[in-house]
Image (spheres, rainbow, N blue to C red):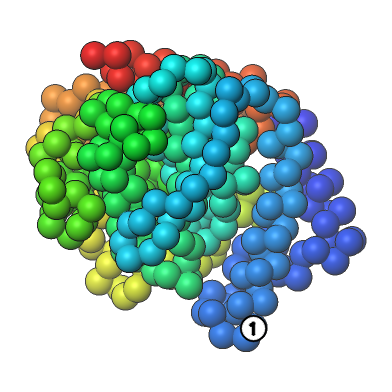
């Protein structure tokens, strides 16, 4: 992990020297609003994020087919990227929702992660480029993700997919969106027009959830007090800015789809693999979620990976733990998609 941190700090210094970093630390800094100053900070943060992630996305598995297209959901055309690891006419699918604090990232920022999941699982991976905040605040991104899942479940053959065999996966913000989408499709499918034709079928299509170091609603925890800083963009101020930028109003903090630990976690949910990072302020969120799901009798496997920071999945070029965690998730999904 030391080599990763040193690389990240060197890369950040190089970006600043090149003038790519106009925000103070690569976050949205002090003004998350989409006014003139806020918009410039957001654009700079997104540019820096993609430039930094370019190194980590080099190499990795080669796909049989990669295709970008649009899926209509939540009143907009949502860009998606499908990676197919083999030439089978019909494949099960993992819907992948990227992290980035709801404000950063796209189909390119997590591309290697998606390809590793595809190769290791044998399933197609559908990465979703949901609308970011603050341009679209909660619950827009959630509804787009749930809508894409519903489209694939009910019309999978159109894309060469078995719509009855889906998993949902995500890292960080993407993990929160993954769990939030499953809860929304279970509890209020009427809010997802794409599921209207057969909401029960849509929810039943979800065979697994792969949840990597997500934020599930803990406001205060020992891990938040112990970890996070300028080196990983996960300081207390950073986390507060992320929340303020994502949510539409203070009352949204109590929504079960924004804070899943407040949801009914006793009712039906797909089998879950929960993986957290030891040196992550969100570590306790993963542990709390896993404990709740176990207590409710759900099928759940979980692990806190020792010695790694938040976002460690990106660092597969240097960090063996990244590949191991993705492989474990892929195998978890593969086994349940085969049932």
Q: Between residue 102 and residue 73, name the one nearer to us.
A: 73
State whether residue 176 appears in this view: yes
Q: Is residue 73 above or below residue 291?
A: below
Question: Does 331 sit left or right of 3 as displayed?
Answer: left
Pick the front one: 268 or 215: 268
On screen, residue 99 versus residue 149, left or right, reads right
Q: Quadrant of residue 233?
A: bottom right
Q: Is residue 46 above or below residue 283?
A: below
When the figure is inspected, residue 293 is found, relative to residue 250, above or below; the finding is above
Instruction: Give the percent coordinates (x, y) of residue 265.
Output: 16, 40
Q: Quadrant of residue 238?
A: bottom right
Question: In the image, residue 187 lies at what x, y percent?
Answer: 12, 49
Q: Is residue 261 left or right of residue 304?
A: left
Q: Nearer the viewer, residue 172 or 221?
A: 172
Disc 1 crowd, CA 10 A, few/some/many (<14, 14-19, 20+): few
Foreground residue among 219 and 84: 84
Q: Quadrant of residue 205?
A: top left
Number of numbered tags placed on the structure image: 1
Q: Position of residue 217 (x, y in %)?
A: 32, 52
Which residue sits at x=52%, y=79%?
33
Q: Which residue is mark 1?
A: 37
Q: At x 49% / y 48%, what residue is drawn?
A: 69
Secondary structure beneath disc 1?
Answer: helix
- Seen from this angle, which residue lies furthest bottom? 36
Measuring 70% from the left and 67% from the top, which residue is drawn there?
Answer: 44
For the C terminus, the image quarter is top left
- In the picture, which quadrant includes the N terminus? top right
Residue 72 percent location from the top left of the image: 36, 56
In the displayed structure, does residue 266 sit left or right of residue 181? left
């Amino acid at each position: 992990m030391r080599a990763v941190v040193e690389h990240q700090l060197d890369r950040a210094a190089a970006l600043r020297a090149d003038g790519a970093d106009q925000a103070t630390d690569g976050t949205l800094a002090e003004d998350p609003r989409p006014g003139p100053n806020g918009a410039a900070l957001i654009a700079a943060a997104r540019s820096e994020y993609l430039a930094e992630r370019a190194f980590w996305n080099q190499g990795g598995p080669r796909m049989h087919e990669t295709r970008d297209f649009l899926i209509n959901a939540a009143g907009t055309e949502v860009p998606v990227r499908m990676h197919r690891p083999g030439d089978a006419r019909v494949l099960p699918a993992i819907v992948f929702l990227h992290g980035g604090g709801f404000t950063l990232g796209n189909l390119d920022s997590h591309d290697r992660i998606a390809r590793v999941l595809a190769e290791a699982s044998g399933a197609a991976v559908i990465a979703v480029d949901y609308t970011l905040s603050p341009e679209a605040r909660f619950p827009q991104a959630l509804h787009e993700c749930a809508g894409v899942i519903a489209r694939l479940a009910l019309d999978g053959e159109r894309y060469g997919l078995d719509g009855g065999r889906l998993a949902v996966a995500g890292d960080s913000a993407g993990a929160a969106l993954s769990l939030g989408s499953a809860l929304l499709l279970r509890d209020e499918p009427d809010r997802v027009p794409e599921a209207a034709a057969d909401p029960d079928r849509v929810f039943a299509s979800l065979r697994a959830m792969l949840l990597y170091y997500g934020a599930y609603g803990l406001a205060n925890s020992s891990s938040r007090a112990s970890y996070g800083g300028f080196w990983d963009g996960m300081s207390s101020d950073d986390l507060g800015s992320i929340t303020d930028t994502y949510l539409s109003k203070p009352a949204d903090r109590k929504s079960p789809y924004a804070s899943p630990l407040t949801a009914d976690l006793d009712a039906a949910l797909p089998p879950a693999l929960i993986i957290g990072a030891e040196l992550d302020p969100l570590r306790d969120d993963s542990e709390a979620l896993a404990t709740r799901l176990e207590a409710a009798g759900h099928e759940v496997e979980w692990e806190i990976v020792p010695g790694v920071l938040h976002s460690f999945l990106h660092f597969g070029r240097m960090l063996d733990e990244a590949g191991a965690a993705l492989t474990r998730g892929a195998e978890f999904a593969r086994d349940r998609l085969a049932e």
